[in-house]
Image (spheres, helix red, strand yellow):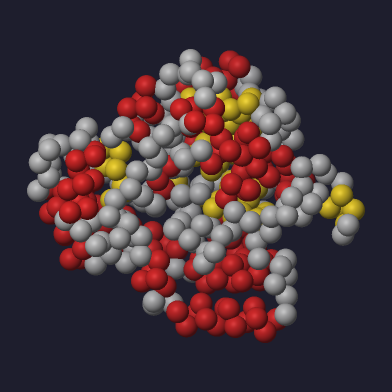
Amino acid sequence: MIALNDLARGHHAGLDELRSACERVIASGWYVLADEAARFENSFADYCGVGHCVGVGNGTDALEIALRAADIQPGDKVVTTANAGMYATIAITACAAEPVFVDVDPATMSMSPASLRAALEQRPRAVIVTHLYGRLAAVEELVDTAHDFGAIVIEDCAQAHGARRRGEHAGTFGDIGCFSFYPTKNLGALGDGGAIISNDKSFAVRARQLRQYGWKHKYQCELSGGRNSRLDEMQAALLSVKLGWLDVQNDARRSIARRYFDGISNAHITTQHRDGESDVVHLYVVRSPYRRQLAAHLFDAGVQTDIHYPVPDHRQPIFADRFAATLLHVTEALADEILTLPCHPTLSEEEIAHVIDACNRFRP
């Protein structure tokens, strides 16, 4: 079976570096918020081209802490899309804020500027822009539009590590950038982790306090909404190693995406051109009106697939009928057709060719 991800294989070439990092942490005797975390925060800030990076426990915590550090209050409206797996929505509701869902562009599958513009009439306090599947959204237009209405912009970069446009990295177009380092991400830990980046020093100070109980000084809580969400030393050390691999691995993902786009030719499967530095191809997603049959065919052919994501946020059971009147036609159509193919950096030429051949042989 050709796996959607093969994390063990992805670490083979750098195993000695990873072992050395682990041994360094063990020997140090410091395992939380010490030299390794500081080193990674500085390296990742430099890589992204920002002044501040705050390591946290995971990507969803990064979004929630970012909202709290930006002083989002209960009842405040926060705009987001409904096709990105509930992560932003969970962070919004954890702050007791009100999610406002907008539709996506059918070509990019990310936030539609026109839909955002209409939603901003509700005067939200913030907008969360997700760079879905590793491709930068129309973020410059989205940021300008949001700022015109006085809303801050938080970029959800959980799938877009290293994506850039005209020299600017994902997470630096808006006011705040949030990252996940879940193992399957383009920059993934060997556990969990996350980070928040910003050029705003006062915001970074608040985020650092909120990741550790809201402390101003040890055992002195100054901010409400604090939690225990810290990037531990082991994960920070491993991420420092893997940061050095990121650009090369992103190039490998782009190469696979080009092969898929050029090679898959089937009237029942819609592929997308995915290339250029603004797209790091975290996931390669195709569309088919016969998704269930296509997934079964590929499974029988030895190709693992998945759906990212099958249930839009506004239709999740947790909300019951709360958003019954919210109609997101593009989002809902995509949820019925999208299918993710394997696209990890260690796919072999033979495996890529096998996926292409299996797709081309599909008949509903």
At x 48% / y 18%, what residue is drawn? 324
Q: Is residue 345 visible?
A: yes
In terms of image quadrants, where is residue 69? Answer: top right
Decide: is 140 above or below 211.
above
User: What number of labels is visible?
Assistant: 0
Q: Quadrant where the N terminus lies?
A: bottom left
Quadrant of the rendering where the C terminus is positioned: top left
Report x, y in % for residue 216.
86, 52
Residue 208 in the image: state x and y as whole percent. Answer: 75, 53
Residue 327 point in image, percent of width and height: 43, 18
Asked if residue 336 lies left or right of residue 315, the reply is left
In the rendered view, would you say 85 is above or below 348?
above
- Can you see residue 151? no
Q: Residue at x 87, y 49 (%)?
A: 221
- Would you identify the image quadrant in which residue 307 lies? top left
Q: Going 39% across and 71% down the picture, which residue do you hit?
A: 8
The structure residue drawn at horizontal position 48% and vertical position 31%, both measured from the top left corner, is: 316
Q: Can you tell which quarter of the image residue 223 is in?
A: top right
Q: Is 51 placed left or right of 278 in the picture? A: right
- Return the residue nearer the eye: 116 or 328: 328
Q: Position of residue 43 (x, y in %)?
A: 60, 64
